[in-house]
């Protein structure tokens, strides 16, 4: 069985993200997660963007930086990078098989009853690769929640909770306080936790848990001023002033930038040596594919992985601010709040093309079409993503953009097609 076959054979979630399984696995592997310092980034939305900002900032300080994020858009190796470069194919295959062999030993001795799930395997591979490459620090994005997530086996210098909103309620709870409680599992005793802007009930839960563990809470926007000047912003925090920083597109990315800056400052306080102004300025170079990513052409395409109501609301705000007429190609997972997402995005579009990713979890095109019809909008079905993209390009009027949203899996499939068309 190859590494890819082994990964495909494992479920994504298993019974539930099992920290107990992960602890036994990393022990068998010689605790690779202890070989480097880390920052652990949790949150409903924005944690990938904050990780991208931090990666650029820390690398500017001549640190060797590992980054572990999820999901990927095109190639699974995108999830694991060192110094901005994806893990190589040979290293990926070798380390997946190393994790498999360790798992088989644990099963043979009765320590584990089954192989780790897909995400746990990938997390272990990331830890092994970061140890092998002798990274100075790793930026680790939580996969789901925090308390039971595989990444939570690490011992971060600083934890960050970017945002709290409704998503994955079947795993995390039905209230914002319950969701916040799960994500607050990343808080470490005696260390700093950076908390982004969020509903009061969620923030109160995190602060209560942090205080019970003797952790210091850094409210990301307390004492902070942010002024816009064209595409750039000037940010002043209690620790420093950072002029002319260019955030990623969208108002929500200005918020994520501040959260990343406060996390960087907290890492400096925790002993990571860097020039903070220089590191923050380097965040202007951050890229985060598939999030308000624009592909020029006739027509231009705008890809955004908005996959829950909060993400859809952020995309809708961006489209309203830009005022660009557009055709929307939309596909989503049926276990998301599809109606709420559609209510945010469908009315903004001249035409909605409902499509479907080839996954059991995907909402049907008929369901999406029916939502559009209930809203009194012009909508059509196109089950094939390729045909949906071609149809959108064909019907887009001069001056219109094709917006693709609703699922990162959909965005990844479309992005792959658009990249293939770019001249080399």
Image (tube, grey):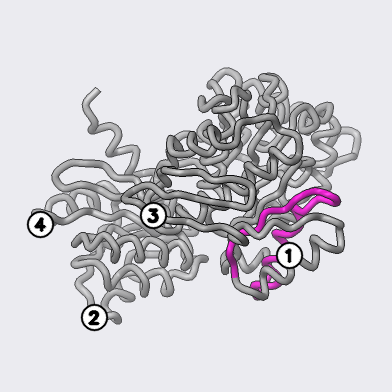
Q: Are marks 4 and 2 in contact (CB under 8 Å)?
A: no
Work out whether mark 4 precedes mark 3 in sequence or the reverse, and give the earlier one: 3
Which numbered disc, 4 or 2, marks the residue closer to the eye? 4
Q: At 66% from the left edge and 32% from the top edge, which residue is drawn?
A: 126
Front residue (pair 150, 261): 261
- According to the image, label 4 marks what residue? 397
For the N terminus, which image quadrant?
A: top right
Residue numbers of the magenta segment:
173-198
Gap between marks 2 and 1, in whole Å? 41 Å
Q: Which mark is residue 228?
A: 3
Residue 130's x, y, as percent? Answer: 68, 26
Q: Is residue 251 left or right of residue 267?
A: left
Per the image, the residue denoted by label 1 is: 206
> Counting other residues with Cα less than 10 Å from the Cα at mark 1, is it few (<14), some (14-19), or many (20 or more)?
many
Which secondary structure, mark 4? loop
Does residue 56 appear in this view? Answer: yes
291 versus 123 height, above or below = below
Determine whether the residue tagged by mark 1 lies in a helix, strand or loop.
Answer: helix
Q: Residue 104, can we see it? A: no
Mark 3 Cα within 10 Å, few/some/many (few <14, many 20+)? few
């Amino acid at each position: 069985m190859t590494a890819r076959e082994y990964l495909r054979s494992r479920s994504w979630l298993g019974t539930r993200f099992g920290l107990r399984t992960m602890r036994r696995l990393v022990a068998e592997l010689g605790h690779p997660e202890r070989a480097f310092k880390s920052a652990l980034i949790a949150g409903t939305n924005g944690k990938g963007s904050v990780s991208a900002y931090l990666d650029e900032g820390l690398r500017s300080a001549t640190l060797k930086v590992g980054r572990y994020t999820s999901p990927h858009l095109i190639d699974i190796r995108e999830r694991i990078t060192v110094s901005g470069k994806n893990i190589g194919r040979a290293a990926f295959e070798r380390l997946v098989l190393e994790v498999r062999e360790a798992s088989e030993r644990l099963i043979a001795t009765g320590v584990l009853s089954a192989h780790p799930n897909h995400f746990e395997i990938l997390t272990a591979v990331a830890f092994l690769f970061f140890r092998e490459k002798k990274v100075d620090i790793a930026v680790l994005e939580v996969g789901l929640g925090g308390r039971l997530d595989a990444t939570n086996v690490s011992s971060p210098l600083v934890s960050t909770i970017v945002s709290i909103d409704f998503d994955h309620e079947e795993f995390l709870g039905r209230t914002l306080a319950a969701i916040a409680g799960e994500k607050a599992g990343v808080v470490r005793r005696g260390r700093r936790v950076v908390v982004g802007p969020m509903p009061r009930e969620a923030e109160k839960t995190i602060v209560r848990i942090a205080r019970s563990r003797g952790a210091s809470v850094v409210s990301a926007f307390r004492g902070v001023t942010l002024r816009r000047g064209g595409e750039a912003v000037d940010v002043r925090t209690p620790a420093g002033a950072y002029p002319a920083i260019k955030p990623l597109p969208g108002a929500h990315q200005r918020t994520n930038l501040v959260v990343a800056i406060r996390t960087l400052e907290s890492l400096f306080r925790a002993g990571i040596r860097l020039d903070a102004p220089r590191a923050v300025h380097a965040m202007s170079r951050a890229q985060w594919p598939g999030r308000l990513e624009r592909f020029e052409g006739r027509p231009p395409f705008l890809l955004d992985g908005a996959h829950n109501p909060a993400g859809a609301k952020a995309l809708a705000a961006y489209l309203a601010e830009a005022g660009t007429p557009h055709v929307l190609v939309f596909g989503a997972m049926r276990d998301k709040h599809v109606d709420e997402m559609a209510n945010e995005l469908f009315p903004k579009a001249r035409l909605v093309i409902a499509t479907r990713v080839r996954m059991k979890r995907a909402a049907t095109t008929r369901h999406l079409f029916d939502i559009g019809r209930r809203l009194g909008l012009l909508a059509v079905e196109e089950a094939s993503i390729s045909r949906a993209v071609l149809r959108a390009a064909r019907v887009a009027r001069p001056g219109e953009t094709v917006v693709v949203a609703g699922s990162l899996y959909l965005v990844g499939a479309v992005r792959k097609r658009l990249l293939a068309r770019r001249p080399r």
